[in-house]
Amino acid sequence: MPDQFKIKITKEILQLSMESGIDGDIDKIGRNCAIAVSLNDMFPEVFVTTDYIYPFGINGNNNAGELKIELPQVAKDFVKVFDSLRAIPRVRLCLPEFDFEISIPDEVISRINIDEVKALLVRNVSPSKPVIARERYKMFH
């Protein structure tokens, strides 16, 4: 049975992802957009498209690209607006904070490193907290 997971897009995450895609590098856009930044701590190889989250990337081994999570409509709409502001990235900071839920399939949960999740819980840090997202964001820049 899939687990529900809440993703929060905060002002800090918008700040961290503000310049995503401004250089036109398509490979980086899906790895450092706001939704990807909010998920980087749980899924370090995450790649986000306009319709799906690929928690283990799209070019990995072990059929990683086949495992995907559909974005709800509110998130799809956000991605379209966020992407449309690529030429004026500072305006992305004016986007409102919001959250949405995704259903994480059992196949995805079974591939999550449980030790990493436990470490997050021990530190009492929610996976969508900006502190972890900021650390992961730095890895890609």
Image (cartoon, helix red, strand yellow):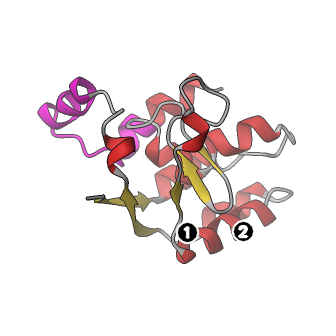
Point 54% across, 31% down: residue? 45
Point 68% across, 61% down: residue? 50
The answer to which of marks 1 and 2 sits earlier in the sequence is 1
Q: Which residue is mark 2?
A: 80
Q: Locate the C terminus and report the quarter of the image it occupies.
A: top right
The secondary structure making up most of the magenta span is helix
Q: Which residue reaches farthest left?
A: 122
Q: Is residue 18 left or right of residue 116?
A: right
SS at mark 2 in the image: helix
Q: Nearer the viewer, residue 3 or 94?
A: 3
Q: Which residue is mark 1?
A: 75
- For the residues labelled 1 and 2, the Cα–Cα distance comes to 9 Å
Q: Amino acid at mark 2?
A: Lys
Magenta highlight on residue 124: yes
Q: Residues within 10 Å of mark 2 (few under 14, many from 20)?
A: few
Q: Amino acid at mark 1?
A: Ala
Q: Quadrant of residue 66?
A: top right
Magenta highlight on residue 103: no
Q: Is residue 25 left or right of residue 103?
A: right
Point 55% across, 46% down: residue? 36
SS at mark 1 in the image: helix
In the image, which residues are magenta? 114-133
Q: Nearer the viewer, residue 41 or 115?
A: 115
Is residue 9 shown above or below 122? below
Q: Residues within 10 Å of mark 1 (few under 14, many from 20)?
A: many
Instruction: Please count the marks in the image.
Output: 2
Q: Locate the N terminus and report the quarter of the image it occupies.
A: bottom left
Residue 105, image x, y percentages = 37, 53
Q: Is residue 41 left or right of residue 14?
A: left
